[in-house]
Amino acid sequence: MKLIKEWEGMAVHFMNLFKNAVEISKRICEQRLKEGDIAIDCTMGNDTVFLCSLIGEDGKVYAFDIQESAVFNTRQNLLQYGYLERAELILDGHQNIDKYVQEEVQLILFNLGYLPKGNHDITTKKDTTIEAVEKCLNILKLKGVILLVIYPGHLSGSEEKEALENFTSKLNQKKFTVTKLSFLNQINHPSELICIEKVC
Ligand SMILES: C[S@@+](CC[C@H](N)C(=O)[O-])C[C@H]1O[C@@H](n2cnc3c(N)ncnc32)[C@H](O)[C@@H]1O
């Protein structure tokens, strides 16, 4: 685990910090997660392995996906890194998160959309995403964060962007700080990041 962290540290040092929304979300994960923390990956995959590297042996990552292949591949990756014990892989939609997570968590990551090399019809959708985010607000620790990586370049993604901006901009500012990071000079509808931090 130490090796992975050191390697990632070097990679960060040499790369463009603002490359895309995923990379920025990862830097926030590194900043906010420590060993022993509980995190949720709302769309499992490589991110699950990354989160497991940050929460250590005493932490836990709940990870959701609706595709059996995502669960299978994530399990294989976790096995390879020796992280299987740190994760609970759940084959269900993140909108059902309340059925599986009954504890407060430090960080919740949504890497929305579809798998680039997978079936593009199997994508996250605004109604279930909003339902999941609403439920996530109830289990967020004080100073905990929800990170939403959005891809507005496809129809479902642009609907999610609109719905999420609408929903999060109405959150009570005494309880949550909401920020949005967008790329102003990139072509083709670049990814965006919405961050929600529980402040009270
Ligand atoms: C951008 S990909 C996730 C990438 C992954 N986080 C990684 O690191 O490789 C989006 C994923 O969301 C999944 N998905 C779609 N709707 C979902 C839902 N309601 N709940 C959980 N996962 C969902 C898709 O199956 C797809 O695997």
Image: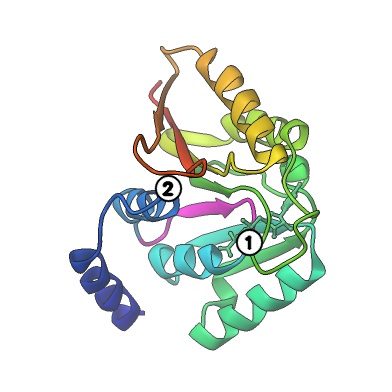
Between 64 and 87, the one nearer to me in the picture = 64
Q: Quadrant of the N terminus?
A: bottom left
| 101 magenta-colored | no
Between 61 and 166, the one nearer to me in the picture = 166
Residue range of the region highlighted in magenta in the rendering: 35-44
Question: Which secondary structure, mark 2?
Answer: helix
Overall secondary structure of the magenta stretch?
loop
User: Which mark sits nearer the N-terminus, 1 or 2?
Assistant: 2
Mark 1, other Cα within 10 Å: few <14 / some 14–19 / many ≥20: many
On screen, residue 189 versus residue 27, left or right, reads right
Residue 138 sits in quarter: top right
Q: Visible in this render: residue 135? A: no
- Residue behind label 1 places its C-beta within 8 angstroms of ligand 1: yes
Q: Which residue is the site of mark 1? A: 44
Q: Which residue is the site of mark 2? A: 21
Q: Residue at 78%, 43% (x, y): give it.
A: 96
On screen, residue 71 versus residue 149, left or right, reads right
Residue 179 sits in quarter: top left
Please, what is the three-letter code of the amino acid marked with disc 1?
Met
The image shows residue 175 at horizontal and vertical percentages of: 45, 17
The image shows residue 120 at horizontal and vertical percentages of: 75, 57
The image shows residue 51 at horizontal and vertical percentages of: 47, 62
Image quadrant, ligand 1: bottom right
| 38 magenta-colored | yes
Residue 89 sits in quarter: bottom right
